Image (cartoon, grey):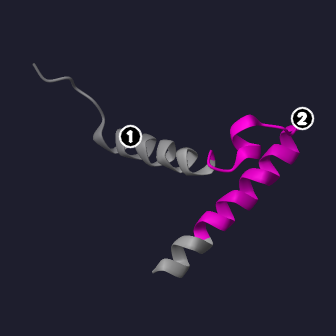
Amino acid sequence: MRIEHDRTLYKQRNRIGRMFGHLKIIRAIATRYDQLASSFLGMVHLATARYWLEFVHAA
């Protein structure tokens, strides 16, 4: 029995899930020490930039 699903949507969801898995390595994001949404978003931006730089450097 096959389960019908949107393949494109599933791929995007998987990509975002893996990205957050990488971001959770950074403790401040995993435990969410920041009280304000803006400071939490700033930490997410910094962590994403760090992850991107590591990716670019490896390539």
Q: Crowding at label 1, few (<14), some or many (≥20) Cα neighbours within 10 Å?
A: few
From the image, give the main secondary structure of the stretch colored magenta: helix
Residue range corresponding to the magenta coloring: 24-52
Residue at 62% x, 49% y: name it. Answer: 25
Magenta stretch contains residue 41: yes
Q: Distance between the Cα atoms at labels 2 and 1? A: 31 Å
Q: Is 20 or 24 nearer to us in this picture?
A: 24
On the image, the x and y values in percent for residue 28 come to 77, 45
Q: Is 46 or 26 nearer to us in this picture?
A: 26
Residue type highlighted by circle 1: Leu
Residue type highlighted by circle 2: Gln
Q: Which mark is residue 9?
A: 1
**Residue located beneath label 2 in the image:** 35
Q: Which quadrant of the figure contains the C terminus?
A: bottom left
* Residue 30 lies in quadrant: top right
Relative horizontal placement of residue 54, taking residue 45 as reference (left or right) = left
Relative horizontal placement of residue 52, taking residue 28 as reference (left or right) = left
Among numbered discs 2 and 1, the one appearing first in the sequence: 1
Provide the secondary structure element on which disc 2 rests: loop
Q: Which quadrant of the figure contains the N terminus?
A: top left
Residue at 29% x, 40% y: name it. Answer: 7
Q: Is 43 or 13 nearer to us in this picture?
A: 43
Q: Where 32 sits versus 27, above or below? A: above
On the image, the x and y values in percent for residue 58 come to 48, 78
* Residue 48 lies in quadrant: bottom right
